[in-house]
Amino acid sequence: MWSVRGQRQGCAMRALLYRRLGRSMATAIATPGRSRNEASEAMISADLMRQPISLKHVRELVSTERTTTLKWGQGKVLVCCGLEAVGGSEPEATAVFLAEGCVVCWQSSDAQRKQMLEIANGCLESPRARGFLHSRTSSLEMLWMQGEPGKVISSETLDMAEAAPGQKTHVNSNGQLMLTVDPEVRVTDQVAVSLGMAVAVRLESLEEKIERLLEEDWKALERLIKRLEDPWYLMVSLKDVSHRIFKYEHVIHKLRYELNAEARLLDSPDLLWENAMAEKLHDKVVAHFDVRRRTEILNQRLSYSLDYLHTLGEHVRHLYSVRLERMIIILITLELGVGLISLFGEQFSPHGALFLTGQKPLAPPNDAF
């Protein structure tokens, strides 16, 4: 089973990654007095939780424990600006909490990011399944990842720099995000980019889920096909085979619905409909992560799996028909055998037809003298 991520990270992506890595290392080397830890602090990180986040509880917790500027976006987004780590030794950072269960930390250190994730983990809608489902990390200048809390399934990199005064936030030809310094639109642009990162995180988690389930189903089907070669297994287990095929088709239809309808990967967020520039920036971030093409590839894989299951189901139905034909032939043969026995029984029985019908023969008449 080929990997979507392996196909996505082709030669062009690897070449771009090497260029970014070389540029980042050159920047770190050329900057006097800059340490590796300082470079790792310049990072955007987006983490997807297992359950939705209660933004109301997050707002109460952050506002009581930290001095920060909170911005509320239609109950779906909570932006916390000016966050400081415990002790005040870390620089201020920005965290964007999304109600769908995503936490995006801007220019935060490892300690700050860990604190934000702990806050979100304590404010989940359902506390039964806590933890991190997936993490996608975007490095602004360096590719180092230190102190990653939770389980990191995959990571992505996105270069970022401060735009020149007067310039708007944009993604240049090298795939580098240039964030505006205008305080009036800076937070709005951060929300737009965070929403784009959330789309990438959801798609990445779906890729992991679809690949894992398809791989498991493929192995199970391979074992099932080998069993179909056993004639005795076919005689007693066709119903079980048909039920398994139905279960696999049901799982694939659920995955397709989750990918195309529930996740809403290709739809613009309602929060950005009234801001054309922010919506355009969101679309550029989504295009940077190649969301549309990766979604099409996943749909193609699901379609192929459905076609394969349909072919296997047709084969099972054909085996049903063959078994039914054999049963009909056996019944006809038995009926002919019973008829032949009846026919020959009438000819060779000492009582003829009376022997088969069960009637008693008539007694010979008594001669009267």
Image: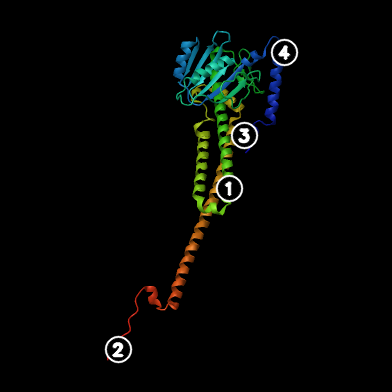
| Front tag of 4 and 2 | 2
Residue bearing the label numbered 2: 367
The image position of residue 79, as x and y in percent, is 51, 16
In this orientation, does residue 162 appear?
Answer: no
Q: Which amino acid does label 2 sit on?
A: Asp
Which of the two discs, 3 and 4, labels the residue nearer the N terminus?
3
Residue bearing the label numbered 3: 4
The residue at 53%/34% (across/down) is 259
Q: Which amino acid does label 1 sit on?
A: Ile
Residue bearing the label numbered 4: 30
For marks 4 and 2, give the CA distance. Answer: 141 Å
Residue bearing the label numbered 1: 225
Which of the two discs, 1 and 2, labels the residue nearer the N terminus?
1
Q: In which quarter of the image is the N terminus?
A: top right
Number of marks in the rendered image: 4
Q: Residue furthest top?
A: 88
| Front tag of 3 and 1 | 1
Which of the two discs, 2 and 3, labels the residue nearer the N terminus?
3
The residue at 35%/79% (across/down) is 361
For marks 3 and 1, give the CA distance. Answer: 26 Å
Which of the two discs, 4 and 2, labels the residue nearer the N terminus?
4
Judge left or right: residue 11 versus residue 122.
Answer: right
For marks 3 and 4, give the CA distance. Answer: 37 Å
Up-down relation of residue 362 to residue 188 (above or below): below
Q: Relative to the observer, which residue lies in front, 108 or 131?
A: 131
Up-down relation of residue 154 to residue 296 (above or below): above
Q: What residue type is labelled 3?
A: Val
